[in-house]
Image: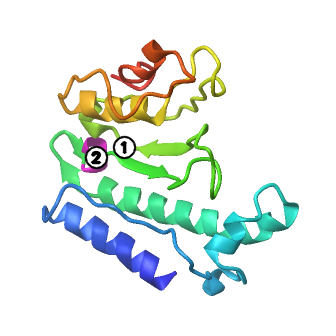
Amino acid sequence: TQRFESQCAIAASAITSGLTNVVTIDASGYYTWTDLGVTLDDHSIGHMAGRPEREPHALPIRRFHAERVADLARRLDAVREGNGTMLDNTLIIWMSDSGEEHHGFCSEWPLVLVGGLAGRLRTAGRFLQFPNYETAGNRTIANFYLSLLHAVGDRRERFGERDPNMNEAEQNGPLSEIMA
């Protein structure tokens, strides 16, 4: 916990001081979060998918990560920048490194967006869920990445490899639901 808290604090300091405008914090690995009362390592917990005994181990870790993301957002929100705050001009993306499960198929990819990216994305106060994989209207993580690219001025319409099981048109372009 101390290492991860330190990484988040260093990231906030690096951004607010202008040292960098991009940081990546990775909390995956084979850690055992004993400070949170968790007795199994992340990898073992990941292999417990679908089993109720997983939750007492996984929930404290998820809560801890969520608190760190919230703390990072508060730190950025405390710095005035232009007509708002640094958080208004920043985008925090909190996401899994493996989709829906530890060794998932990645047919689902939950993520949380915090901040406004200078008004270029609509992120606040909404929950979006797209139809299931291989269902009309389903979108991919590539569509999300295309949204980020469009938000910073790169208007390409394709990104990554095509999924042969999906409609090609639904794999093109950004997610209109989050574009400002």
Magenta segment, prevailing SS (helix, strand or loop): helix
How far across and how far down the image is residue 112, in percent?
50, 45
Q: Quadrant of residue 162?
A: top left
Residue type at mark 2 is Thr
Q: Is residue 6 above or below residue 68?
A: below
Q: In the image, which residues are magenta?
A: 86-90
Q: Which residue is mark 2?
A: 90
Query: How does the figure colour the protein chain or chains?
Result: rainbow
Judging by the rendered image, the residue that carries numbered circle 1 is 115
The kind of residue on which mark 1 rests is Gly
> Residue drawn at (61%, 81%), measured in percent from left and top?
33
Badge 1: residue crowd in 10 Å (few <14, some 14–19, many ≥20): many
- The percent coordinates of residue 16 (x first, y second) are 21, 62
Q: Residues within 10 Å of mark 2 (few under 14, many from 20)?
A: many
Image marks 1 and 2: residues in contact by CB distance under 8 Å: yes
Q: Nearer the viewer, residue 32 or 44?
A: 44
